[in-house]
Image (spheres, helix red, strand yellow):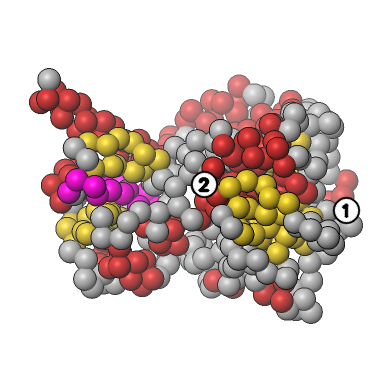
Amino acid sequence: MIDEQGMHFTKGERVLVIGLGRSGLATVEVLRARGAEVWGVDDKPAEQIEPAIREIEAAGATFLDREELERVLPELGAAVLSPGVPLTTPTVRRVQDRGIPVYSEIEVAYRICRAPLLAVTGTKGKTTTTALLGAMLAADGRVVHVGGNIGNALIRETASAAPEDWVVAEVSSFQLESIRSFKPRVSLILNLSPDHLDRYHSMEEYREAKLRIFANQGVGDVFIGNLDDPYIAPLATDVESYRIPCEAWWFSHEPHRNSALYVRDGKICFAKPGAPRAQALMSVSEIPLLGEHNVYNVMGAAGAALAAGASAVAIREAVKAFHALPHRLQLVAEIEGVRYVDDSKGTNPGAVIAALKAFESGRIVAICGGKAKGTDFSEMGDALDASARAVVLLGEASDAIAAHVVRAPLHRVESMEEAVERARSLAQPGDVVLLAPGCASFDMFESAEQRGQVFTALVEALAQRGATRGA
């Protein structure tokens, strides 16, 4: 067995990177810059990833076909797993069978990081919250590096962070599966709801992966959790079964004896555990983001920023200046009295339910569907029945969603272009056309971002046609 504690991912060490997507390529680049000898492998055929192969070879690494892997295994000291690659793939098993330790990218990023790290996870809202937290620390005068599942590889951010800087990381359950010593100064779990059940055997298995975020924390660290979430609240109430190894701060909408952050009289308040009185951080009305779920996102980010020592003034100013991120309840246009909103990153039913609550019931034309992730659409169907004027369905999951929508009229389409046109014809002035897929995008698009970009382009074209007619 190889000595895992001796791995520094630097000169003289030999590392295999499994998966040559965005994070894998960044890992190759950083490890080569640190002097390690690096090989890269991917389950896709070489002809499908030629640009990635050229990129790693330009960095001085070597690409391996899966058939070539066996001859290199005896030379390896470690393997680094890209986030989208399951631990159960044949390539990973071949590596593990030889006693070679397999690390997640965030584990390696943490090991080379010299700055304190704050980590954010959850089923929905984690990208917005991660960006908010980064903005709060920046407003407090810190040099901040933001990375991870938010879109840029964490390892690249930690490699460039100085000891006096701060790193904010969005981490997924996939990334947390194979951590060993990953230990954030502050960890935050926003919420949990069924997701990725095409990868996990049960909700409990998915939950356990998320809870690994605080597994290595200790004295001087802080964990922050959502007391209103039924999957997280037991951590606070059943302390014998769920031992959190560090100080825990909780947030909730209503004041609770365990809450450090909560809403009272329209204001977000903070009472540090053990403090005699609470302070008002800001009014809920100052939050420029749609939906009650964003009040929770702000409380979670504020808690993490406060735990890192940021001032209440910096937190309030950062929130007031914050704008919705692309494809997250982002207003694209208002055309003939109808608002068109892009929530393409809402890739699970819980995100759809939260998005629907942001608008007036009965005034929503929802565009839903895509590639299902093994989740149950029954609660999403109930929410659509309660809130939607009509539901436009596209993609592989159309039948699965339709089976749970009883009252809202259903309209099936074959393309996003047809979906936007159908939604336009159904919407009335004062309505919202809401792209709320509740599914992954890979049946029709390369990513949720591309799906949102296509929706946005179609809406903008629709607005231009309207402007031309009115000219």
Q: In this view, does 444 lie above or below 450?
A: below
- For the point 61% across and 59% down, the residue is 264
Image spot of residue 210 (x, y percent): 64, 61
- For the point 83% across and 40% down, the residue is 8
Residue 214 in sight here: no
Magenta span includes 442: yes
| Dot placed on the residue nearer the N-terminal end, 2 or 1 | 1
Q: How crowded is mark 1: few (under 14 residues within 10 Å), some or many (20 or more)?
A: few
Local secondary structure at mark 2: helix
- For the point 75% across and 47% down, the residue is 306
> Given the image, on which type of amino acid does mark 1 rest?
Gly
Residues drawn in magenta: 428-447
Image spot of residue 187 (x, y percent): 72, 53
> Given the image, on which type of amino acid does mark 2 rest?
Ser
By secondary structure, the bulk of the magenta-drawn segment is best described as loop
Residue 399 in sight here: yes
